[in-house]
Structure formats: structure tokens, C-alpha cells
Amino acid sequence: MDLMLNTAADIVKLLCDRLRKERLARQMTQADVAARSGVGVNTVSNLEAGKNVGFENLVKVAMVLGYGEALEGLFKPRIDSLDDILRYEKSAARQRVKRKNTDA
């Protein structure tokens, strides 16, 4: 499934379904995942239901289910050339993006 073709709500539902399937494939209960990740059972339940759960809790549960490497690559910079490396290093030193002047 191409995630670029869905709404944010569709992607959340898809990822929550995948999370639940992965937990079941590992033969873990919600309580098992909660205990190993240090979050509450309700948090795991809410996460699988697509309800609002903090990002840190999502990361903890994903790590318990073996997705640490995938999380690490989630926001890695895309570097295809030397120019990309230089541009990335230059932007990393910047703290703010300048506001574009829309008055012409």
C-alpha cells in the first residue's frame, strides 16, 4: 500500500492495524507489551485503536515490537550527493527558517 495516496487518518489506521498484527504475530498480549515498554495497558489499547497517544509511548511500544531500526531511519536525511551533504550540514547549524516576505 502506497502511503502517499492516503489521508493522515487512513495512514494512522493502517499503522495501528499493523501494530496490532505484529503484537499478535509475536504472541504477546497488550499487557505483555505494556509491561515490557513501561506504558499502561490502556495506552497500548488506545494505540491499536488509533486514539491519541503520545509520541514517546508510540516509540516505546514500537521498540518492544522490534521496530527500533525503522524508527531510527524514519527522519534520516536523504543524502544522494555531496551537495546534499553540504546543504544538510549548513542547515543543521541553523536554528530558524527565515520567513519569506510575501509583500511584493
Image (tube, rainbow, N blue to C red):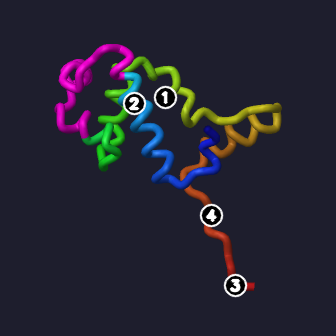
Task: Look at the numbered disc 2 and give the secondary structure of its residue.
Answer: helix
Label number found at residue 19 = 2
Kind of residue indicated by mark 3: Asp
Answer whether residue 27 is magenta in the image.
yes
Label number found at residue 7 = none
Comes first in the chain, label 3 or label 2: 2
Q: Residue 6, position in %: x, y?
A: 58, 51
**Label 3 sits on residue:** 103
Quadrant of image for the N terminus? top right
Total labels: the figure holds 4
Comes first in the chain, label 1 or label 2: 2
Quarter of image, res 64: top left
Q: Residue 16, position in %: x, y?
A: 40, 38
**Label 4 sits on residue:** 98
**Residue stretch rendered in magenta on the structure:** 23-45
Q: Are marks 4 and 1 in contact (CB under 8 Å)?
A: no
Task: Look at the numbered disc 1 and give the secondary structure of its residue.
Answer: helix
Comes first in the chain, label 4 or label 1: 1
Q: Nearer the viewer, mark 4 or mark 1?
A: 1
Q: Nearer the viewer, mark 1 or mark 3?
A: 1
Residue 72 vertical position relative to residue 3 in the rendered view, above or below: above
Q: How busy is the neighbourhood of tag 2: few (under 14 within 10 Å), some, or many (20 plus)?
A: some
Q: CA distance from mark 4 to mark 3?
A: 15 Å
Comes first in the chain, label 1 or label 3: 1
Q: Residue at x 69, y 43 (%)?
A: 90
Residue 104 as seen in the image, left or right of residue 58 = right
